[in-house]
Image: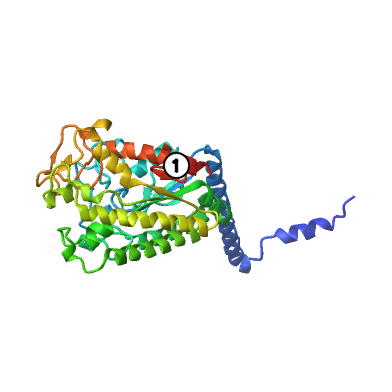
Amino acid sequence: MMSNSFFPSFIGKWQIPSTQNRFDYLLVRRANLGLGLKIFKAVHGLLEVGAALADEDSSKLGASFIFGDSLVDAGNNNYLPTLSRANIPPNGIDFKSSGGNPTGRYTNGRTIGDIVGEELGQPNYAIPFLAPNATGKAILYGVNYASGGGGILNATGRIFVNRLGMDIQIDYFNITRKEFDKLLGPSKARDYIMKQSIFSITVGANDFLNNYLLPVLSVGARITQSPDAFIDDMLNHLRGQLTRLYQLDARKFVIGNVGPIGCIPYQKTINQLKENECVGLANKLAVQYNGRLKDLLAELNDNLPGATFLHANVFDLVMELITNYDKYGFTTATRACCGNGGQFAGIIPCGPTSSMCQDRSKHVFWDPYHPSEAANLLLAKQLLDGDKRYISPVNLRQLRDL
């Protein structure tokens, strides 16, 4: 039989203190309860997020992290005081998720990044980093850091006043990386980023168009730095940027080369070219850079353990569409669907007062600089499922499954 002496001693541990100490006691109890509630919420949040990720089909892409310029900007420039913006109609007229309203994408519909994410099983588009709702679980499927006017070099795009260059974009990813640790816990976050996420980089065109080739006319006499020296500078910066992403746990990369920038409506218009002509200097610079880029990616594949760097041959892909546009159902690969000025509507960017074509699916170019959604669909298809002519050493679907 238990001794009665147990009860007074047990009760004494839980007795309310005398009146003079009661207030202090209640404050301590409240603080302890508050701390316990915070810990419970934090643990519950981690379990909830982890369960949501565990429920996802393992064959689907985890997160898509998108870096680059206006070809893949999903709206970051909406939040910058900049001259480069696409959050005005009729941009986005075919973007179903917004009901045809402009989102800041420099095209009539989806970007290549949007389409690739959809095809790889993402339930949501990668959210622009600068968007107010880019917080909490919203970032788990990816973040878009791309910015219209941005480039590899920090000086690129100054003509637009503000833009996010690659160095700043990676600074922003570093912030995201820390948020993933908070959401998933450090170990699971690292695993998720290294094994289930893809980092896509579409950059370089602005370094030529809005840096090296300024002022407007693309003539060699205006250039004070040799092409070799300028491209060296670009690649040295890009090497450092990709290595920095690797140090932040990025392992699966796809890097697009520079497209045929001498064939865009803007370049053809300001240089007063014929329909079947392109600006030789601009394309020559792109080809020269692209050859060196391929060597850089091979170097990084050899030197960074566990990383896979894909080379996306955007130049040849776009040239195929331009050269054989009718084969793919287009009626023109020279005239912008939306724009004004000159023979190819290539001087004034797309806006409310621009003329717009009747059938947007028949134009390779949406505006003086950017592909239409119809072109983006064809380009994305080759990157997802194409052979080594356009994407190597594997395609994007294979990269996801590595």
Say whether residue 78 is visible. Answer: yes
Q: Nearer the viewer, residue 235 or 10?
A: 235
The residue positioned 17% from the left and 51% from the top of the image is: 267
What x and y, as percent, mark residue 384?
41, 39
Residue 214 vs 47, above or below: the answer is: below
Q: Quadrant of residue 242?
A: bottom left
The residue positioned 16% from the left and 62% from the top of the image is: 215
* Kind of residue sitting beneath label 1: Asn
Quick one: which residue is furthest to the right in this view? 1
Q: Nearer the viewer, residue 365 or 139?
A: 365
Q: Quadrant of residue 276?
A: top left
Q: Coloring scheme of the render?
A: rainbow
The residue positioned 16% from the left and 48% from the top of the image is: 268
Which structural element holds mark 1? loop
200 sits left or right of 44 in the view: left
379 sits left or right of 212 in the view: right
What x and y, as percent, mark residue 190?
54, 54
Q: To which residue does mark 1 refer? A: 395
Say whether residue 109 is visible. Answer: no
Mark count:
1
Residue 178 vs 112, above or below: the answer is: below
What x and y, as percent, mark residue 298?
46, 55
Q: Residues within 10 Å of mark 1 (few under 14, many from 20)?
A: many
Q: Nearer the viewer, residue 84 or 329?
A: 329
What x and y, as percent, mark residue 177?
47, 57
The residue positioned 24% from the left and 39% from the top of the image is: 323
